[in-house]
């Protein structure tokens, strides 16, 4: 009797343990796949991500527009005489991998020297134009090296990138060749392995990499994040209706409310000096947020007229809750920006405390060396006119030929990329001279997001008439420019903090001297 009781007890314990194992092992496996066991328990105390990275291992991403075009999401896909040969495998690693494109047409006609390649998954990745090479012995073949730093499930998109698009394509063809996709795309691609580059979870600051040169950031998808990272302050600041957020690898920034300038005493007058890209941002994004009406009214009331609107000066005053008046001005810069600068002091009463500047579309026909020289003269003259002002240099936003091609105006992706790099060299030279200047790399924030663009070279809806059709084609239009403005306003607010610290330090030194 005792022996049978002991046997029964042993069997009961064995069965219990077996059941627990049957339940526990799948549970542990599921949590491992979701990376819950790899997630930090206290994100604010963690300074850098580990081997697990930010994203769930098994995140399956579906695009809301299905099999329609990325840039015309209410339309189907049109393809042209371009293929990937040999076909891509279904899985690659985060190490460098070469995609070979082949044109099936005459190389002097419809065979591009470059392609636009975009991978969309937990992040958005696009190889730089410098990663593309056309074969000398066979110009129909272009090899593109990709290195996707973040593993996950991706959709691959590709279009031709023509260095020369005839003007009649844009003006006379409903479906010009530059809008055609490579045959067979989009298709699914798994990128395996661990993240090639770790992510810092520290907040951004003006001394870090992000505000001093090329951005190391990329767009990240909310649904692909591990649950812990979805709860971070920077991710919680993203509006619920937004799925994508631009985040640097070297730091993390939250979305900013422009009215925060009310609490920055050193910000008294922000001068925006740039082309139509900056004007669109000023009138469609900044003015409505800071005007009493909440509308793009006053000087930003849209009129399709060069003199009355496009190149006209624009002024507004933002009254803070405490009653402080902050001036915001826009001045248009064309292909003679130094001459334009010379006339500004006579048109403004107060010297700018902060200047947001860009030079881009009007100088696209210039060579990279010519552009570098013009930017150097522009920033140098700005420093002479307003030596105490903080300058935020916005690199030129990219162009998107799969929407519209403007190569006849010199606006090619290769030219814009070269000019962006040249401008950053000038910024470092101006820093050495003593100018208080910081970088917002608008190029990096736009060159993977054609789905947020307007006409292929502008990035916001500026004309009210466009609201009738553009959001149906590209529902996320404006989003890339909003990310640029987050960085611009963060830089100004950080600068205000540094100025207050410098002021307190100077006051302390003066007291000790006395």
Image (cartoon, rainbow, N blue to C red):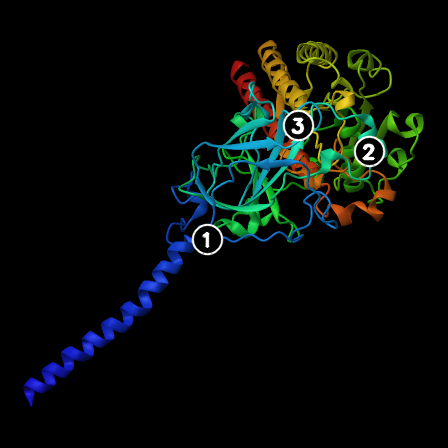
Q: Closer to the camera: disc 1 or disc 3?
A: 3
Residue under numbered circle 3:
111
Q: Horizontal placement of 135 versus 317: left or right?
A: left
Badge 3 density bin: few <14, some 14–19, many ≥20, Cα 10 Å: many
Tell me if label 3 and label 2 are in contact, CB under 8 Å: no
Q: Closer to the camera: disc 1 or disc 2?
A: 1
Asked whether 311 or 304 is in front, the reply is 304
Q: Separation of disc 1 and disc 3 at Cα? A: 38 Å
Which structural element holds mark 2? strand
User: Which mark is first along the chain, 2 or 1?
Assistant: 1
Badge 2 density bin: few <14, some 14–19, many ≥20, Cα 10 Å: some
Residue visible at 66% across and 18% down in the picture: 419
Residue under numbered circle 1:
58
User: Which mark is first along the chain, 3 or 1?
Assistant: 1
Which structural element holds mark 3? loop
For residue 100, which numbered disc appears in the image? none
Tell me residue 110's x, y (percent).
70, 29
Q: Horizontal placement of 343 versus 254: left or right?
A: right
Asked whether 271 or 364 is in front, the reply is 364
Residue under numbered circle 2:
317
Q: Separation of disc 3 and disc 2 at Cα? A: 52 Å
């Amino acid at each position: 009797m005792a022996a049978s009781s002991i046997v029964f007890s042993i069997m009961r314990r064995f069965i219990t343990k077996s059941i627990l194992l049957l339940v526990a092992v799948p549970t542990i496996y599921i949590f491992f796949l979701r990376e819950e066991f790899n997630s930090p328990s206290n994100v604010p105390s963690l300074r850098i991500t580990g081997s697990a990275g930010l994203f769930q291992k098994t995140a399956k991403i579906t695009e809301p527009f299905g099999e329609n075009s990325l840039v015309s999401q209410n339309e189907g896909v049109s393809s042209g005489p371009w293929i990937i040969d040999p076909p891509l495998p279904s899985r690659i690693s985060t190490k460098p991998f070469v995609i070979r494109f082949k044109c099936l047409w005459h190389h002097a006609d419809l065979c591009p020297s470059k392609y636009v390649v975009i991978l969309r998954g937990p992040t958005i990745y696009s190889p730089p134009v410098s990663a593309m090479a056309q074969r000398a012995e066979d110009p129909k073949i272009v090899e593109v090296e990709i290195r996707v730093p973040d593993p996950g499930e991706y959709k691959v998109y590709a279009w031709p990138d023509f260095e020369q698009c005839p003007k009649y394509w844009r003006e006379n063809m409903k479906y010009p060749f530059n809008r055609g996709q490579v045959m067979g795309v989009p298709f699914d691609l798994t990128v395996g392995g661990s993240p090639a580059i770790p992510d810092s979870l520290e907040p951004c600051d003006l001394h870090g990499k992000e505000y001093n040169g090329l951005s190391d950031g990329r767009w990240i998808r909310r649904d692909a994040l591990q649950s812990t990272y979805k709860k971070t302050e920077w991710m919680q600041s993203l509006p619920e209706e937004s799925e994508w957020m631009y985040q640097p690898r070297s730091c993390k920034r939250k979305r900013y409310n422009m009215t925060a300038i009310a609490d920055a005493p050193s910000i008294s007058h922000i001068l925006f000096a740039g082309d139509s890209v900056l004007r669109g941002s000023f009138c469609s994004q900044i003015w409505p947020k800071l005007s009493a009406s909440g509308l793009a009214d006053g000087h930003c009331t849209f009129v399709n007229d060069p003199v009355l609107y496009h190149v006209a000066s624009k002024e507004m005053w933002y009254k803070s809750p405490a009653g402080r008046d902050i001036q915001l001005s826009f001045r248009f810069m064309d292909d003679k920006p130094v001459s334009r600068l010379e006339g500004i002091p006579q048109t403004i009463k107060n010297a700018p405390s902060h200047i947001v500047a860009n030079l881009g579309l009007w100088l696209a026909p210039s060579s990279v060396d010519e552009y570098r020289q013009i930017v150097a003269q522009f920033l140098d003259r700005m420093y002479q006119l307003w030596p105490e002002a903080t300058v935020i240099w916005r690199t030129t936003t990219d162009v998107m030929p799969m929407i519209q091609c403007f190569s006849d105006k010199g606006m090619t992706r290769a030219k814009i990329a070269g000019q962006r790099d040249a401008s950053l060299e000038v910024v470092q030279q101006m820093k050495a001279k003593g100018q208080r200047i910081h970088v917002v790399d608008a190029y990096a924030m736009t060159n993977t997001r054609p789905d947020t663009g307007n006409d292929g070279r502008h990035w916001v809806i500026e004309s009210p008439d466009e609201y009738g059709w553009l959001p149906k084609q590209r529902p996320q239009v404006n989003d890339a420019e909003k990310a640029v403005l987050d960085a611009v306003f963060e830089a100004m607010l950080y600068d205000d903090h540094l100025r207050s610290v410098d002021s307190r330090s100077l006051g302390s030194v003066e007291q000790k001297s006395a």
